[in-house]
Image: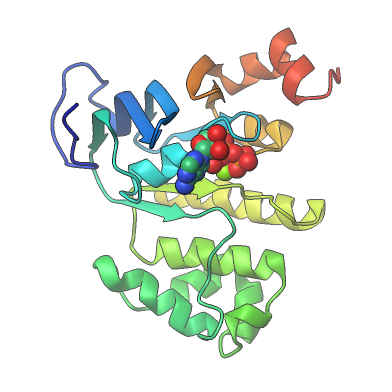
Amino acid sequence: MKSTEPAAPSADMSVANDSVLATVDLVVRYGAVVALHGVSIHVAKGEMVALIGPNGAGKSTLLNTLSGINRPASGRILCNGKLAHVPEGRQVFPDLTVEDNLCLGAYRGGSRDTAPMYDLFPQLQRLRNRRAGGLSGGEQQMVAICRALMANPDVIAVDELSQGLAPLVVSDIARHLVELNKQNGTAVLLVEQNAQLALNITSRAYVIENGCIGLEGRSSDLLRNPAVRAAYLGGIR
Ligand SMILES: Nc1ncnc2c1ncn2[C@@H]1O[C@H](COP(=O)(O)OP(=O)(O)OP(=O)(O)O)[C@@H](O)[C@H]1O
Ligand SMILES: [Mg+2]
């Protein structure tokens, strides 16, 4: 099957024209393993969308394919703007300072002025000359998000915002993402194991299982959906 170039900007009548990011029937394989079986999603301009699902469902594969790390076997990626990716595990450059990590985020054409990042996350200001590898997990997550934002993206895809972080740190970072979305209109695609958090801060969501989108809808509806509650919210009321 012919490979499709990722993230080539193009007009496509099969996805809503207010989309900043969309996939159409995306298939991704790792050798014989099919990780995504024809996934179609879209994110509208300025929208916050969650992608939830169990371990191994294909969430990181989807984000890595959107950002060009994986090549799709078939299907299309439509990106109507600039995408920035906060990878799973943060992946800051450990031996570089916070400031230098941020500056590297501007390599795709954003401004090298880091001041707006310290406005967004004031906690980073006093850490700007520290080695990123010596920071706490939460601080590294802030660096990773700011490094992505330095590209001045239209949409930011965040893989596992809460991974390994204390609940208070997570809600603080999540609040900043919501603020960013409201103030700058930056669209957010949030991959998150904490379904409660993800559905609380987004307006729409997809549930991915075994490489297929099983459910999609308004986050508030999915929060009430019995299947979602049983599988992802511990059956809580
Ligand atoms: N480099 C790889 N080589 C082979 N198989 C892979 C590779 N990366 C992922 N997979 C497989 O693809 C499937 C999807 O993995 P992926 O990492 O996308 O899941 P995920 O939803 O992000 O899971 P998690 O919640 O644990 O991060 C899994 O079955 C995984 O084992
Ligand atoms: Mg993952």
Q: Confirm whether residue 163 shows in the render.
A: yes
> Residue 121 appears at what percent x and percent y?
59, 68
User: Which residue is more in the foreground, 151 or 125?
Assistant: 151
User: Which residue is more in the foreground, 55 or 133?
Assistant: 55
Residue 222 lies left or right of residue 145; in this view the side is right
Report the label total.
Answer: 0
Point 80% across, 51% down: residue: 167
> Residue 216 appears at what percent x and percent y?
52, 16
Point 71% across, 10% down: residue: 227
Point 65% across, 30% down: residue: 54
Point 62% across, 79% down: residue: 133
Q: Quadrant of residue 71?
A: top left
Q: Is residue 96 above or below residue 31?
A: below
Outermost residue on the front side: it is 32
Outermost residue on the left side: it is 11
Residue 47 lies left or right of residue 232; in this view the side is left
Image quarter (top left, top right, bottom left or bottom right) of the C terminus = top right
Q: Is residue 225 above or below residue 133?
A: above
Image quarter (top left, top right, bottom left or bottom right) of the N terminus = top left
Q: Quadrant of residue 152?
A: bottom left
Image quadrant of ligand 2?
top right
Q: Confirm whether residue 181 shows in the render.
A: no
Q: Quadrant of residue 55?
A: top right
Here the colouring is rainbow
Q: Is residue 69 above or below residue 91?
A: above
Residue 216 lies left or right of residue 165; in this view the side is left
Residue 162 lies left or right of residue 10; in this view the side is right
